[in-house]
Image: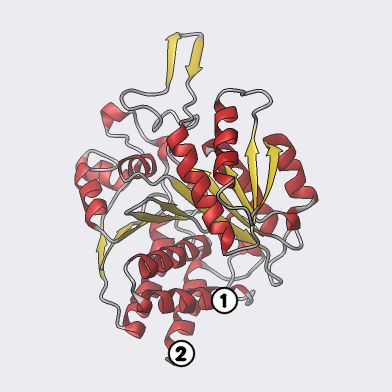
Amino acid sequence: MKLLILPGDGIGPEIMSVNRQAIEGLKEKFNLRLDLHDRDIGFRSLKKDGSTFPKEILADARNANGTILGPVSSFDYPPKEKGGVSPSATLRVELELFANLRPSRTRPSIASVAKNLDILVVRENTEGFYSDRNMFAGLGEFMPDKDLALSVRKISRHASQRIARKAFELSIGRSKKVTVVHKANVLKMTDGLFLSVAREVAKDFPGVLVEELIVDAAAAHLIRRPEEFDVVLTTNMYGDILSDQIAELSGGLGLGGSINLGATHCVAQAAHGSAPDISGQDIANPSALMLSTVMLFKWIGEKYNQSGFLEAATLFEDAIEAALTRKEFCTPDIGGNGTTSSFGGEVCKFIKAKEG
């Protein structure tokens, strides 16, 4: 198995470093046939190779059995003609990673706004208002003159069908409830199409309870009654915003694990950004990236029928959860007194000490 590791920008290299140490421990513990390939992206590769995402890295990702993408500072990249290419958008489009899965849940040891929350956001990942990925050629955003900016939103039946089906399939292993979030009262054609497709797909899952909420109402209800949500199915931008809100309700974005999933490829990517303001201070929370890697290992285990990866994912998750109960190892963003290094060290210690 080949695993591509892309540390990224800002806090990316330091949280990827401790995540990589944990992977090495799991590789040894379970005798995993796993080759780790590290490649620079972002500002490091821009300086070295003239691009924030060199073309050969896309080929590496196509040939890998899984990719771990660190946080990137795409907002600060130069224009495309000067080498600024979004690694996240490129991977999602070129590998057809149509589903972004973002789970969040509360934990007794972590202070949170919500008291009882366990939600999986299933977000369409390839179109919507995201102008860097919703067109075959060119961008879905443009300025006819200096005082007018326009943006095109793309919603297709095909993309809506496959993300809706993925959400309903995932609900079977959970509480069998899907909340479809939309704005079809205003965006009658685009969100109207998405909603109608979700209703069609729902007919194939008669045992699943379906709830429909307008996006602004959903944002309010997630605060008022978060315990009543299970799987949230929505479009690209709504999913991006609501999943951050849900993560904060459950304890913070530092706990926001996430994978980008397609038919043949999977990319683990923490939900948070590159946080350059705390880069190099050894206080960044590696939990989200680690939890994303857990999800990737589960996907590899299921797709390739590799029981060792499933066992490794379980132990990795147990190690993370154990460390999250210890304030002396947790990072400051979740109320701890620890560091990136101390949290990673405790996770690795748990992995090594576990009998098996």
* Residue 83 in the image: above or below residue 55: above
x and y, in percent, of residue 245 in the image? 65, 47
Checking the image for residue 353, the label placed there is: 2
User: Dot 1, crowdedness within 10 Å: few (<14), some or many (≥20)?
Assistant: many
- Which residue does the numbered mark 1 point to in the structure image? 323
* Quarter-of-image position of residue 192: top right
* Residue 113 seen anywhere in this rendered image of the structure: no
Q: Secondary structure at mark 2?
A: helix
Q: Quadrant of the C terminus?
A: bottom left
- On screen, residue 242 versus residue 314, left or right, reads right
Q: Work out whether 283 lies above or below 329.
A: above
Relative placement, left or right, of 155 versus 211 is left
Q: Which amino acid, mark 1?
A: Ala
Q: Residue at 71% across / 41% down in the picture?
A: 218
**Residue at 52% in and 56% down:** 169
Decide: is 10 above or below 356: above
Q: Quadrant of the N terminus?
A: bottom left
Q: Is residue 77 left or right of residue 275?
A: left
Identify which residue is drawn at 37% across, 43% down. Answer: 92
Decide which of tag 1 and tag 2 comes sooner along the chain.
1
Q: Quadrant of residue 15?
A: bottom left
Residue 12 at x, y percent in the picture: 41, 55
CA distance for labels 1 and 2: 13 Å
Q: Residue at x 35, y 31 (%)?
A: 78
Classify 10 Å Cα crowding around label 2: few (below 14), some (14-19), many (20 and above): few
Residue 48 occupies quadrant: top left
Which amino acid, mark 2? Ala
Check contact, mark 1 vs mark 2: CB within 8 A. Answer: no
Instruction: Please tell me whether residue 219 is drawn above or below residue 140 in the rendered image.
Output: below
